[in-house]
Image (spheres, rainbow, N blue to C red):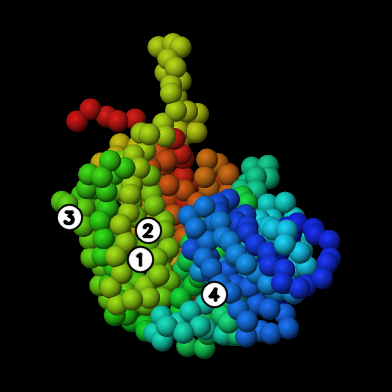
Amino acid sequence: MKALLLVGALLTAFAPCAHGQVTSRITGTVYDSIGSRHLSDALIQLVRGDNPAATLSTRSDAEGRYAFDSVSAGTWLIGFYHPMVDSLGLDMPTLRIDINRADPVRAMLTIPSAATVVRNTCGPLPKGHGLWYGRVKNAATGGLAAGATVLAQWSTLVVQGTSISRQLGTVEDTARDDGLFAMCGVGTDEIVVARSWLGPDSSGVATLSVPSSGLLYRDLWIAPVIMAQRRVADDSLSSDSLKVPVRVGDRSLRGRVARVNGSPVEGARLRVPDSGVEVVTNSNGFFTVDSLPAGTQTVDLRALGFLPVTQTVDLAAPVVTQDFVLESRTTYLDTVKVIGQRIMENPRYLDFLQRKKSGFGYFLDEDQIERRQPVFLADLLRLTPGIMVMPSTFGGGSIRMRGSSFTATCSPAVFVDGMLMAQLEGVDIESFINVQDVRAVEVYARTASIPSQFMTLTGCGSIVITTGARRKRPS
């Protein structure tokens, strides 16, 4: 892994002359090209080249400006320190200044642009790919986790004919002695899930996105893994249950869920997928989640009428406070212009109604879905005969069905609006569709009952989802 280098400084030129009693004034600014802002309170140091013990220091003001007065003639090295430089893992900049005359010298010190950092670290990258880097830290000790493995995965939906496939991207790196890792080639503007581990210690799921600028800095926290067994129902019509492993710990997450205007959201459902724990906010929007595993974890937050929120939190302290803001879905509804009174029904929904008359599968129409008022897609599927929602490798829940005599469960084929979703084994069902966009669901648990257009050669059943706005029925 290449070191991340700091570049950029501009000096005025000046002609040589005898040293004598010459002194000069050095001024400049400290600028952050990544954040497009001047850096205040940066520590700027001057070190004399022939006497390292001779050091001058000052700090930048609110506008990033600094100045050294009466600097004696000779060769000096100038550099600066700022907490952001350390957090980004960038090398401290140094620049040589030769003072031979009394003319003022101007030195511009900069943190390079995102593009420069990416290029210096990774070299040329394909369009749509960037750099995620940070440090791996241990939540139990507070120290750096040198040698920890970091794995990032993301998927891109590709439409090919009548099927939708998921192309999986993977990048892996190992943290160096200072805990720093660099993930070159991560897809930008994609939902990226990541984990880090070192021996028996591991983080939970981290959900993040590299911005279109191509550069993201974010640390990961790992901690000892403590597992427990939790029982879940085999399916909605069975009295049997299965034991599934979940992570537990001694950390607590507290906070408040509010609307954009600050008013509380009551009844919002918050879950931490790795732990299998789910809580509901009270009338004032407050929540508390206990017995959580330490380290970086993902929190999934949903409430009826609001856009879902998935956010990564670092449970590095015994008690962590984190507030959330939910935005109303109505804010994002497009303006509809009425140009006629005739209602044209969605052909896909009409096809669903026709198949429902056959009675060969299990069907949920828009009325039934509205009555259930689901917040998660798992809420619908968990109550469907023959379906189980199991914790997946990277968090959330994956869809399983009862298998043949050779296997206890299998991964069903999933069709969305008639298109096959490929490569869904172990994938969180909430990651590819929002339940508030679901208008109808069909479940074919037995291969003999599957319509020909939804038949696959997997030997498992099929789930067919029709999307669209559900019409509100008068009560």
Quadrant of the image occupied by residue 235: bottom left
Q: Residues within 10 Å of mark 3 (few under 14, many from 20)?
A: some
Per the image, the residue denoted by label 3 is 282
| Measured Cα–Cα span from mark 2 to mark 3 | 17 Å
Mark 4 surroundings: few (<14), some (14-19) or many (≥20) residues within 10 A? many
Residue occupying image coordinates x 30% and y 48% = 303
Judging by the rendered image, the residue that carries numbered circle 1 is: 272
Query: Counting residues from the N terminus, which is met first, the one under dot 2 or under dot 4?
Result: 4
Residue 291: quarter of image: bottom left
Residue at mark 4: 135
Residue under the point 42% across and 18% down: 343
Are discs 1 and 4 less than 8 Å apart at CB?
no
Measured from the top left, where is residue 4 in percent x and y?
67, 70
Extreme residue toward the right, this view: 16
Q: Amino acid at mark 2?
A: Asp
Q: Are marks 2 and 4 in contact (CB under 8 Å)?
A: no
Q: Which residue is mark 2?
A: 300
Q: Helix, strand, or loop for circle 3? A: loop
- Which element carries disc 4, helix, strand or loop? strand
Quarter containing the N terminus: bottom right
Label 2: which secondary element: strand
Q: Closer to us: mark 3 or mark 4?
A: 4
| Disc 3 from disc 1: Cα separation | 18 Å
x, y percent for residue 409: 46, 69
Marks 3 and 4, how far apart at CA: 36 Å
Tell us which disc is closer to us: 1 or 4. Answer: 4
Mark 1 closeness class: few <14, some 14–19, many ≥20 residues within 10 Å: many
- Residue 269 position, x and y percent, is 28, 55
